[in-house]
């Protein structure tokens, strides 16, 4: 029993060490982060100006307040790296395609957990470098165009919890795309479809409350809505009460399901792997 516990603790420390290694590596790309900050400031400003034009025409017909929309946009830009699936790691795809995954399989660790921790570290390091300047400047902008504080401290804590859960849902979904490379000649087709689906159904292009009521209720059931949609709407004050707790429950449900499906597909891929035609 003690040996088994020591072995489990050793494996956990291995994944933590791998996470820390890739997190520190990600913090080195400061020039790329600076360029990303400028781009995200410009993109966020254009989105807010677009929404302002619509709200000036007929503010009463929109489902979210303008200040809530602005908070949604700035938080979306600040934590872009956490939820954007087009930021998948090309190295993982290349490892599978060129056959170097065999070196990963020689390690006495679970490849699903290894890649999961690696993806988490990569996204978190990018977000850490970018979020602080964006949040700071956005909070200094005049109302309603700046970043306002959440309605309560409880809402802030729920935002942090759902932000972390949404990140894990995003990574678990990306793991399905990575693993699909074991079963296809090229993963590019699945990758393009996955990225497009997340962009549209997660609220990246248009916040989900702006969709027609029937579509919004349908989209809320998809795993994509459990990514950035939930934490950003909780922070902006648009999601509260019963709907908020229901969204959090769906987040946790999809996280468990996606991880379970990912591990099952990974085990299926490990049974028979063809590398370099052999």
Image (cartoon, rainbow, N blue to C red):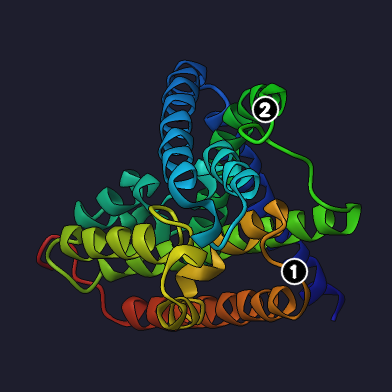
Q: Is residue 263 left or right of residue 165?
A: left
| Element type at mark 2 | helix
Residue 49 position within the rendered picture, expressed as x and y whole percent measured from the top left? 45, 33
Residue 140 position within the rendered picture, expressed as x and y whole percent measured from the top left? 71, 22
| Element type at mark 1 | loop
Q: Is residue 47 left or right of residue 256?
A: left
Mark nearest the camera among 1 and 2 is: 1
Q: Earlier in the sequence, mark 1 or mark 2?
A: 2
* Residue at left offset 62%, top offset 74%: 251
Residue for badge 2: 132
Closer-to-camera residue (269/165) = 165
Mark number, residue 273: none
* Residue at left offset 57%, top offset 48%: 69
Q: How many marks?
A: 2
* Residue at left offset 52%, top offset 38%: 77
Mark number, residue 240: 1
Closer-to-camera residue (248/212) = 212
Check the image and name the residue furthest to the right: 153
Determine if residue 32 is in view.
yes
Closer-to-camera residue (246/105) = 246
Residue 144 position within the rendered picture, expressed as x and y whole percent measured from the top left? 65, 36
* Residue at left offset 68%, top offset 25%: 142
Quarter of image, res 268: bottom left
Closer-to-camera residue (143/246) = 143
Determine if residue 172 is in view.
no
Quarter of image, res 254: bottom right
Residue 121 position within the rendered picture, expressed as x and y whole percent measured from the top left? 58, 45
Examine the rendered structure and indicate whether residue 94 appears above or below residue 247. Answer: above
Q: Is residue 215 left or right of residue 237?
A: left
């Amino acid at each position: 029993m003690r040996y088994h516990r020591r072995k489990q603790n050793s494996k956990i420390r291995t994944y933590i060490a791998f996470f820390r290694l890739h997190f520190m590596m990600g913090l080195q790309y400061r020039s790329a982060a600076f360029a990303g900050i400028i781009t995200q400031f410009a993109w966020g400003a254009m989105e807010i100006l677009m929404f302002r034009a619509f709200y000036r025409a007929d503010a009463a017909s929109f489902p979210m307040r303008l200040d809530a929309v602005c908070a949604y946009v700035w938080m979306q830009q600040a934590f872009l790296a956490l939820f954007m699936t087009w930021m998948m790691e090309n190295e993982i795809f290349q490892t599978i395609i060129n056959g170097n995954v065999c070196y990963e399989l020689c390690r006495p660790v679970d490849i699903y957990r290894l890649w999961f921790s690696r993806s988490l570290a990569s996204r978190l390091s990018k977000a850490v470098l970018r979020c602080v300047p964006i949040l700071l400047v956005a909070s200094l902008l005049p109302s309603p165009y700046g970043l306002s504080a959440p309605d309560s401290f409880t809402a802030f804590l729920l935002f942090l919890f759902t932000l972390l859960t949404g990140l894990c849902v995003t990574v678990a979904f990306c793991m399905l795309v990575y693993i699909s490379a074991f079963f296809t000649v090229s993963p590019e087709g699945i990758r393009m479809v996955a990225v497009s689906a997340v962009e549209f159904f997660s609220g990246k292009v248009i916040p989900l409350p702006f969709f027609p009521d029937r579509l919004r209720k349908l989209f809320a059931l998809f795993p994509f809505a459990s990514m950035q949609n939930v934490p950003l709407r909780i922070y902006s004050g648009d999601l509260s009460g019963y709907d908020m707790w229901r969204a959090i429950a769906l987040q946790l449900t999809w996280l468990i399901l996606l991880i379970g499906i990912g591990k099952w597909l990974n085990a299926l891929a490990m049974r028979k792997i063809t590398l370099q035609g052999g």
